[in-house]
Image: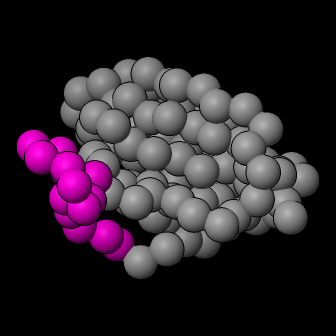
Amino acid sequence: MERQEFFTPPKHVGFKAKKLFENGGQIADVAIAYMEPNGGGPTQLHTHSHDHLFIVVQGEAKILLNEKTVIVKKDESFLVDGSVPHSVWNNADTQTVMIGITVTKQ
């Protein structure tokens, strides 16, 4: 999904929203993670049959994907294809808070 900016939906006041994900599968579970500086995992890249939608609400996350690195900043999201070897790490000097949503493939 391309990077979106915050917007005010019609008939809303004092309300800002930002789409982070749409049309990508069925939600299996949702978790929140608190990653300390240098925290993350797993320590070796891994794969699985489901995808992960990571949403950073505080700090900054670094997602390792084979030979590619993706930085996800506060109020941004990234959908990880579970078939691609990956791991996720705190990329900030302070605690990073991230929502992880397990998405089953359609």
13, 51: nearer the viewer: 13
Q: Give the side of residue 8 with respect to residue 106, left or right.
A: left
Q: Give the side of residue 10 with respect to residue 20, left or right.
A: left
Residue at point 45%, 45% (across, down): 55
Q: Is residue 14 magenta?
A: yes
Relative vertical location of residue 3 with respect to residue 94 in this rendering, above or below: below
84, 50: nearer the viewer: 50
Relative vertical location of residue 18 with respect to residue 2 in this rendering, above or below: above
45, 31: nearer the viewer: 31
Seen as rendered, the residue at the extreme bottom is 2
Q: Where is residue 85 in the image (x, y as percent from the top left)?
A: 75, 59
Q: Can residue 26 be seen in this view?
A: yes
41, 104: nearer the viewer: 104
Magenta stretch: dominant secondary structure: loop
Q: Position of residue 70 (x, y in %)?
A: 45, 64
Seen as rendered, the residue at the extreme front is 11
How many dots with numbers? 0
Q: Does the magenta stretch include residue 45?
A: no
Residue at point 27%, 38% (across, down): 59
Quadrant in the picture for residue 28: top right
Q: Position of residue 51 (x, y in %)?
A: 74, 54
Q: Where is residue 2 in the image (x, y as percent from the top left)?
A: 41, 77
Q: Which colour scheme is used?
A: one colour
Query: Which region shows up in magenta?
Result: 3-17
Relative vertical location of residue 40 with respect to residue 89 in this rendering, above or below: above
Residue at point 33%, 37% (across, down): 57
Seen as rendered, the residue at the extreme left is 14
Q: Can residue 82 be seen in this view?
A: no
Residue at point 52%, 25% (across, down): 32
Q: Give the side of residue 52 with respect to residue 3, left or right.
A: right
